[in-house]
C-alpha cells in the first residue's frame, strides 16, 4: 500500500450490513488547525447502523459512498499549521466532526485539534475508543443540559448500554440518587457502577415504581412502548425529560405542558474540554469503561449485526491497526 492510501470501511449504499466493505482510499491530510491521527481503534454506536440503513445521520452525510464512524482513539501522526495543543506522538481520543462525516472506520482521520483530548492513560486504545460519543452524550445531557445537582433524583433508561453505563457513573459522581432500567441480569453490575435502584423493565411498568424524579435521561424513545410519554408520569413538577434518540414530538411537548414538566431534545457535540475531564475521571478510577466486543475493520458488518441485535453491555469497538 502506498503512503498516500489507507484502509477504510466504505459504505457504497444504504441498506444492510452487506453495504460495508474494506477498501483502499486516499489518506487525508491535515489543514491548518487540524491534526492527522493514526487510528488504533474506532467505537461502534447505534447512530452508525441507523445511518448505514438510511436514517440516523444519513440526511447530514448525504448519498454514499462515505465512511462511517465518529469515535476514535489513536496517535497524532502530523499537525497542521497553528496547532499548539497537541504534538506528533500524543495519544488522543475524540468524536470529531459529529454529526458531519468523520470517517472513523479507517486507519487515519483528520479533524480540528481541539475536538480531541489526550487519551486516558490507564486504558488502552480499544477502551478509549468506546468512550467519546457515549460518554459525551451522557456528560452533556446531565451536566450542560439538565444541570444535575447533588441530591437530585435522576432516572436513566437503557442504563446497561453505551451511553447508559456512563450516565449512571456520571450521575453518581455528581451526587445524584440514581434510578435505572435494565433487564434482570444487569442489575448487580449497574449497582456496582453506582445505581441506587434498578428496575427490570421486562417485569414491571417503570412508572408504577419510580416517582419524584428530577431528571429523566431517555435513551429509548417513544418508538419502544411509549417510553418517553410514560416517563412524564415519574417526573416531579418542573422536572426535565431529556429525549435523546428521537427528540420531542408535538404530542410529547403538549403532554409535558399539561403535566407541568419540561422536555428537551438533545444531540451530542464534539467537546475536547469535556473529554479531558472524562479522562481524568477514568484515570482516577471513578469511571470504568465497558467493552463487550472488539472486531477488526474487516468485521465491521459483524459488529453492526451484534449491535443491532440489542442487549449489548457497554460498547463495541473496531480495531483499526493490524
Image (tube, helix red, strand yellow):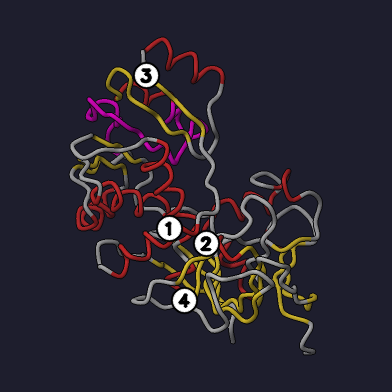
- Label 1 or label 4, whichever comes before in sequence order: 4
In this rendering, which labeled residue sits more in front, label 1 or label 3?
Answer: 3
In this rendering, which labeled residue sits more in front, label 4 or label 2?
Answer: 4
Magenta segment: does it hold 31? Answer: no
**Mark 4 touching mark 3, by CB under 8 A?**
no
Q: Give the SS element for disc 1.
A: loop
Q: Going by the image, does 304 lie left or right of 193?
A: right
Residue denoted by label 1:
312
Quadrant of residue 314 in the image?
Answer: bottom left
Quadrant of residue 206 in the image?
Answer: top left
The numbered dot on residue 125 is 4
Q: Residue at x 37, y 35 (%)?
A: 146
User: Of all residues shown, which one is farthest toward the top?
Assistant: 258
**Mark 2 touching mark 1, by CB under 8 A?**
yes
- Label 4 or label 2, whichever comes before in sequence order: 4
- Label 3 or label 2, whichever comes before in sequence order: 3
* Alpha carbon distance from label 1 to label 4: 20 Å
**The C terminus lies in which quarter of the figure?**
bottom right
- Counting the numbered discs, the total is 4
- Label 4 or label 3, whichever comes before in sequence order: 4
Residue denoted by label 2:
306
Amino acid at each position: 500500500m502506498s503512503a498516500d492510501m489507507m484502509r477504510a470501511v466504505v459504505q457504497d449504499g444504504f441498506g444492510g450490513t452487506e453495504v460495508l466493505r474494506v477498501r483502499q482510499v486516499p489518506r487525508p491530510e491535515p489543514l491548518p488547525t487540524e491534526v492527522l491521527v493514526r487510528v488504533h481503534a474506532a467505537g461502534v454506536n447505534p447512530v452508525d447502523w441507523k445511518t448505514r440503513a438510511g436514517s440516523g445521520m444519513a440526511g447530514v452525510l448525504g448519498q454514499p459512498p462515505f465512511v462511517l464512524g465518529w469515535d476514535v482513539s489513536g496517535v497524532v501522526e502530523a499537525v497542521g499549521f497553528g496547532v499548539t495543543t497537541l504534538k506528533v506522538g500524543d495519544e488522543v481520543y475524540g468524536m470529531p466532526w459529529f454529526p458531519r462525516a468523520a470517517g472513523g472506520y479507517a486507519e487515519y482521520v483528520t479533524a480540528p485539534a481541539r475536538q480531541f483530548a489526550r487519551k486516558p492513560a490507564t486504558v488502552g486504545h480499544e477502551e478509549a475508543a468506546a468512550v467519546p460519543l457515549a460518554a459525551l452524550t451522557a456528560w452533556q445531557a446531565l451536566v450542560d443540559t439538565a444541570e444535575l445537582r447533588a441530591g437530585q433524583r435522576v432516572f436513566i433508561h437503557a442504563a446497561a448500554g453505551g451511553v447508559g453505563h456512563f450516565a449512571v457513573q456520571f450521575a453518581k459522581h455528581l451526587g445524584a440518587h440514581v434510578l435505572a432500567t435494565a433487564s434482570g441480569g444487569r442489575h448487580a453490575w449497574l449497582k456496582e457502577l453506582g445505581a441506587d435502584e434498578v428496575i427490570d423493565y421486562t417485569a414491571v411498568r417503570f412508572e408504577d415504581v419510580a416517582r419524584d424524579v428530577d431528571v429523566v435521561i431517555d435513551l429509548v424513545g417513544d418508538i419502544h412502548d411509549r417510553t418517553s410519554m410514560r416517563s412524564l408520569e415519574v417526573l416531579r413538577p418542573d422536572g426535565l425529560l431529556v429525549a435523546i434518540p428521537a427528540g420531542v414530538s408535538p404530542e410529547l411537548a403538549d403532554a409535558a405542558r399539561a403535566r407541568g414538566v419540561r422536555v428537551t431534545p438533545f444531540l451530542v457535540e464534539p467537546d475536547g474540554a469535556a473529554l479531558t475531564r472524562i479522562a481524568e475521571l477514568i484515570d482516577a478510577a471513578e469511571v470504568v469503561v465497558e467493552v463487550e466486543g472488539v472486531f477488526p475493520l474487516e468485521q465491521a458488518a459483524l459488529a453492526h449485526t451484534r449491535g443491532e441485535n440489542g442487549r449489548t453491555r457497554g460498547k463495541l469497538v473496531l480495531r483499526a491497526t493490524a
